[in-house]
Image: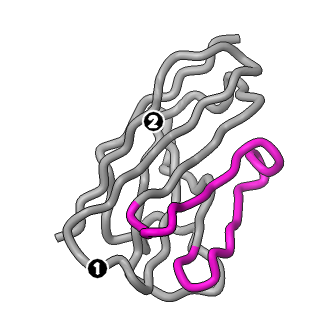
Amino acid sequence: QVQLVESGGGLVQAGDSLRLSCGASGGPHSMYTMAWFRQTPGKEREFVAGITSNSGRTNYADAVKGRFTIARDNTGSMVYLQMNSLKSDDTAVYYCALRRELEVTASTMANEYEYWGQGTQVTVSS
């Protein structure tokens, strides 16, 4: 059973940076896609960034392009989200997700991901 654990959330000011980490354990991680989603109260979970295992291709939501960077380590068990130039609109609970599927580009659909972390709160004060 795959388990995902996020860390790195917190309270920052607008314009600051923050790095989220996600550790995956409990199973082979070959042929998978990992992604970050975020959710605010009353809204659906939205795609933030994704990365594929085969090509390492990344994709981003328009709202974070140029500010956020997703990356993984060589073991494939860690994925990171570097968030720069944070805005108050980035305030949300951020979730790490994994999908056991080889993809050209990471899916942006939350319901296609099988495994989820518990979430980490990011609060950006203006």
Q: In the rendered view, would you say 83 is above or below 23? A: above
Q: In the rendered view, would you say 22 is above or below 54? A: above
Furthest toward the right, the residue is: 66
The residue wearing badge 1 is 28
Look at 35% across and 54% down and name the residue there: 23
Q: Position of residue 121 (x, y in %)?
A: 43, 29
Give the image quarter of residue 59. Answer: bottom right
Horizontal arrangement in the rendering, residue 61 relative to residue 37 (left or right): right
Color encoding of the figure: one colour
Horizontal arrangement in the rendering, residue 57 relative to residue 115 (left or right): right
Horizontal arrangement in the rendering, residue 55 relative to residue 53 (left or right): right
Looking at the picture, tell me which residue is in the foreground, 84 or 114: 84
**First in sequence: mark 2 vs mark 1:** 1
Q: Position of residue 124 (x, y in %)?
A: 61, 19
Q: Using the image, tell me which numbered label, if any, was put on residue 93.
A: 2
Q: In the rendered view, would you say 20 is above or below 78? A: above
Look at 63% across and 75% down and name the residue there: 56
Quarter the N terminus occupies: bottom left
Look at 54% across and 21% down and name the residue there: 123
Q: Which residues are magenta?
A: 52-77
Secondary-structure class at tag 1: loop
Q: Main secondary structure of the magenta part?
A: loop
Look at 32% across and 71% down and name the residue there: 114
Few, some or many residues within 10 Å of mark 2 (<14, 14–19, 20+): some
Quarter the C terminus occupies: top right
Secondary-structure class at tag 2: strand
Marks 2 and 1 sit apart, C-alpha to C-alpha, by 27 Å
